[in-house]
Image: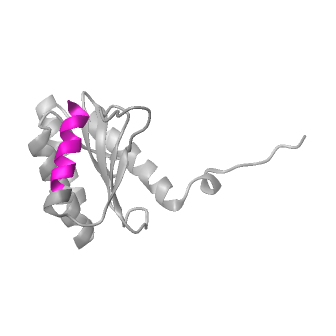
Amino acid sequence: MGRTKSSTSQTFTAEERAAMKEHAEERKKEARRASRADKAAAAERDVLDKIATMSDHDRALAERVHAIVRENAPTLAPKLWYGMPAYALDGKVVCFFQNAEKFKVRYATLGFNDTAKLDDGDMWATSFALVNMTPEVEERIAELVRRAVG
C-alpha cells in the first residue's frame, strides 16, 4: 500500500489558512497583554477595529450584532476568534459573526458554539444566515443571545 502525500494547502482553502493565521496572531496578542481589564478593553477594541475593516454591508450587520450582544448578554466578552468578532463566556466562545466577504459567500452568518444553551430537543440550529437587519431580525438575535447564556 502506497502512502499519499497531503499538504495543508490542499486540505484548506486560502481563506481558511488565513483565518488560522489570524487565530494564531490573536492568541499571541492575548498572551502579551497585562491585566484582565487591559485584556478586556483591548479585546473589545480589536473586535471594533475588525468590524471597521469590513465592507459597508457586513460592517452594518456586525455593528448591530455587536450592540445587540453587548446589550442582551453583558456577561459575554468580545474577542477575535479566527479573525471574526466573537463573544465568550469564561474564555469559551459562545457566538460569533462571520462576515460574507471573509469566506467569499453570499451571506453573513451568526453562529453559536456548543457552549451556547440553545438546545431544543434532539436537533436545533447553531448558525443563522444574516442578510439584512430588520427589527424582527434584531429581536430574534437578542432572544438567541439571551438563551445562549441563560
Is residue 35 shown to the viewer in this render?
A: no
Q: Is residue 101 above or below residue 139?
A: below
x 18%, y 36%: residue: 39
Residue at the extreme left of the image, as rendered: 71
Q: How is the image coloured?
A: one colour
- Which sits in the foreground, 144 or 9? 144
Q: Give percent across and percent down for residue 96.
A: 30, 47
User: Which quadrant of the view contains residue 53?
Assistant: bottom left
Magenta segment main secondary structure: helix
Q: Give percent across and percent down for residue 71.
A: 9, 44
Determine if the magenta segment contains residue 63.
no
Q: Is residue 16 left or right of residue 62?
A: right
Residue at the extreme right of the image, as rendered: 1
Q: Is residue 124 left or right of residue 4?
A: left
Q: Give percent across and percent down for residue 27.
A: 34, 39
User: Which quadrant of the view contains residue 89?
Assistant: top left
- Which sits in the foreground, 123 or 65? 123
Q: Is residue 13 above or below residue 121?
A: below
Q: Which residue range is magenta in the image?
A: 138-150
- Which sits in the foreground, 48 or 64? 64
x 24%, y 67%: residue: 132
Determine if the magenta segment contains residue 144.
yes
Q: Is residue 100 left or right of residue 78?
A: right
Q: Is residue 3 above or below residue 51?
A: above
Q: Give percent across and percent down for residue 56.
A: 22, 72
Is residue 51 shown to the viewer in this render?
A: yes
Placement of the N terminus among the 4 image quadrants? top right
x 61%, y 56%: residue: 9
Placement of the C terminus among the 4 image quadrants? top left
Q: How many numbered circles are shown?
A: 0
